[in-house]
Structures are given as structure tokens and as C-alpha cells.
Amino acid sequence: MNEQNIIKGCIAYDNAAQKALYKLYAPKMYSICLRYVKDTDEAKDVMQECFIKVFTSIQKFRSEGSLEGWVKRILVNTALNHIRKNKAVLQYVDATEIELANLEDTSNDEGLEGVDFSEEELLNQIQALPEQYKIIFNLYCFEDYSHKMIAEQLSISETGSRVRLIRARKMLQSSLMKLQQERLKTHALMNKW
């Protein structure tokens, strides 16, 4: 079944078309969802809510972009709504964030050049970020949201978005450095034997 037939079938509430659409995009959407929510049960709930929205509003899809991009946008918005409803962590802005507002992002990849991490390793490190940083990191780095868009979506200041992105990058860099150091220790031990 090609994409156009899937869309037409979903508009007609055809179960086979809905299953085909779900099978086509669910794995990728689930991995995206896991970037926003750690808990697998919570991610499944967000996914289910997303696909319900997709199936009930697919007639609004105008084929101006890719179907995958449209589904992804619904997923991200669903995840953000879920986070907003269930958590207040995004609203808190401390004095340190305001003081750091004009700092440049001085994080760099020194020590990580040429190091390859698996998708699973990177996902685990992103998931380990505190939620207020993880969400902004995902929106900025993966969804290409501007700080203005993030601020509007999350009802925070642009400054808060910038500072949290800087902090997220530094935390991620630090955790990746630790992961690489653990790899090197393990490799050294293996070579001793």
C-alpha cells in the first residue's frame, strides 16, 4: 500500500490503512517519543494519543510536506502537552538562569572528536538529562525550533530557553565524556588480559 492509498484509507476509517500507517511510522515515532518521556509506559500513552489524533484529523493533511513530518509534528505537540499537563518543571526559572542569560555557549567537543556512540547510548544520555533541559535540547536540536518558538510553546522566556540549552549541552558533553572514559578503562583492562 503506497502513502496516498494509506491516507485515503485512513480518511475512510479503513482498519487496514490505519494499521499500515501505524506500522510505517510507529517505530520511529516511538524513539522520538522516548527522547521526551523516559518511562516506556508513558511513551506508549503519548504514542497512542498521537495516533488517535492522526487518525481523527488525517483529512486535514494537505500533502504540502511529508506525511512523516506531519505525524512527527503531532507527536511532538502531544508529548509537550502531556508534559505540560503532568509536570510543572518548565515554569521554574532561577536567579542563576537570569544571570547566565548573556553567556555564550562555550561547550565544545574537545575530547570527543572521532568518538562514535551508538543511537542507544546517545538516547540514554539524552534521557538522563533533567526534564527541563532535555525538552529544550530536543526541541532545539532535533525539531529545529528557535528559542522564540520554544519560549512560546513552553511559556518560558527566550533567555530561559537559551540558558537551559547551554546547560543541557554541557551536561550531555560531560556524560558522554564519562561514557568514553569508561570505554577506555574497559578497553585497557581487556588489553591487559
Image (spheres, helix red, strand yellow):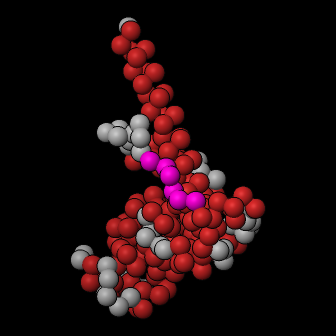
Count of numbered marks: 0
- What predominant SS class does the magenta segment belong to? loop
- Left or right of 93, for residue 58: left
- Residue at the outermost top position: 193
Residue at position x 60%, y 73% in the image: 158
* Above or below 36: residue 185: above
Q: Is residue 162 magenta?
A: no
Quadrant for residue 166, please give it.
bottom right
Residue at position x 46%, y 21% in the image: 185
Viewer-side residue, 22 vs 187: 187
Whether residue 43 is visible to the viewer of this picture, yes or no, is: no
Viewer-side residue, 135 vs 124: 135
- Left or right of 86, for residue 58: left
* Above or below 123: residue 9: below
Q: Quadrant of the C terminus?
A: top left
Quadrant for residue 49, please give it.
bottom right
- Left or right of 144, for residue 135: right
- Could you say where residue 92 lies in the image, as x and y percent from the top left? 74, 65
- Could you say where residue 88 lies in the image, as x and y percent from the top left? 74, 67
Viewer-side residue, 103 vs 185: 103
Residue at position x 76%, y 62% in the image: 95
- Could you say where residue 71 lies in the image, as x and y percent from the top left? 42, 76
- Left or right of 37, for residue 12: left
- Residue at the outermost left position: 2
What is the span of residues highlighted in magenta in the rendered image?
A: 103-108
Whether residue 172 is visible to the viewer of this picture, yes or no, is: yes
Residue at position x 43%, y 14% in the image: 189
- Could you say where residue 59 lies in the image, as x and y percent from the top left? 41, 91
Q: Quadrant of the N terminus?
A: bottom left
